[in-house]
Image (spheres, rainbow, N blue to C red):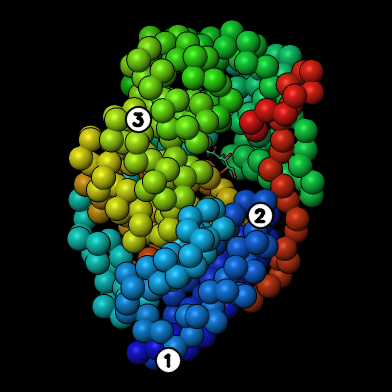
Amino acid sequence: MKIQSAKVIVTCPGRNFVTLKIVTDQGVYGIGDATLNGREKAVVSYLEDHVIPCLTGMDPRRIEDIWQYLYRGAYWRRGPVTMRAIAAVDMALWDIKGKMAGMPVYDLLGGKSRERVMVYGHANGADIDETVDAVGHYIDMGYKAIRAQTGVPGIKDAYGVGRGKLYYEPADAALPSLTGWDTRKALNYVPKLFEKLRATYGFDHHLLHDGHHRYTPQEAANLGKMLEPYQLFWFEDCTPAENQEAFKLVRQHTVTPLAVGEIFNTIWDAKDLIQNQLIDYIRATVVGAGGLTHLRRIADLAALYQVRTGSHGATDLSPVTMGCALHFDTWVPNFGIQEYMRHTEETDAVFPHDYRFEDGHLIVGETPGHGVDIDEALAAKYPYKPAYLPVARLEDGTMWNW
Ligand code: GCO
Ligand code: MG
């Protein structure tokens, strides 16, 4: 059996998605997600110019060997572009293997560990009252876990405040739009949001919060401590994680659970955080961290330290990633939670899939492979549109972490 051809499909049904399609000489094909928000074309070129020429003629059944070939063979290891390209190949090959075996991917991984996967949705508003209402809306929709983000008075477009209610999309302009940040103002305001949320809805639902890499370790420790009375499910990306040691200081001062990993590419980004038990949830996901083949290694390391998974699932991860993530979540023994930012109807139509939302959970499908397809004719109707994530500056003009 051989890989006969492969191609990259770029489509923009409201936002850009990059999809790799691998076709075998036996007519079976598989697809993988290669979307890198704001840097999409770099991955397109990496795949078209440097990966597809090597893949043609290879045996698609050798998923592990192809992974090692692309990782070691490039010599230049890791990085978001390389690892997304490898992830796309990996997803497509697991899809092909599942179709050949007549089995859903979770069965290939080792079978179901659970019937359904708890997800969290994104509630946000311009101020505390709007966010409290938005959380109520998610509770009404059946969610058991909700991430809450609020605008902060005096900060221009603080992180997490969407324009629409259900479909928050940060990559919203052809060049990066300018947003503001002020840690002091956020530290004064965010705890009040959670105080009001608990006063309004009680403690039955899981609440989450994303710091989006904005705080220093000391500030993150302070916020984590202030949030303790509200018993968060997690405090995400409380401080940048390039320096994994930075989490030590946060950990020493707060018992609020910590989650990190949406921008991680490999197990090396998480190794010290996991082995030193500095986090509670690892948020690496299929497209970001080299596909199912590599993500399962991260999860297995995490399991040794009682760290659970919490895969990134924002709208910039296509339904192909969501499908693969759900197979992974259904199998992985140390599952924690899955992020679920809904895709628009246009996106769902381009990527027909068999997973479904029910009672605050996503339920994986039974179709052989990963259960997500691409309607190429429909995809072709939505050409690529440049879209960047915003940037953030402090009031004095200093560049900050968006
Ligand atoms: C999250 C994330 C996203 C990112 C986005 C960037 O927790 O869902 O922080 O919303 O900002 O994925 O492309
Ligand atoms: Mg995040």
Give the amino acid at mark 1.
Asp
Between 36 and 66, the residue placed more toward the observer is: 66
Which residue is depicted at the point 47% across and 58% down? 77
Q: Which residue is mark 1?
A: 25
Residue 155: quarter of image: top right
Give the amino acid at mark 2.
Arg
Q: Position of residue 108 (x, y in %)?
A: 24, 66
Say which mark, if any, is on residue 39.
2
Q: Residues within 10 Å of mark 1 (few under 14, many from 20)?
A: some
Q: Is residue 401 visible?
A: yes
Which residue is depicted at the point 48% across and 65% down? 75
Element type where label 1 sits in the image: loop
Say which mark, if any, is on residue 279.
3
Label 3 CB-ligand 2 distance < 8 A: no
Lower position in the chain sequence, tag 3 or tag 2: 2
Say which mark, if any, is on residue 53.
none
User: Outermost residue toward the front?
Assistant: 75
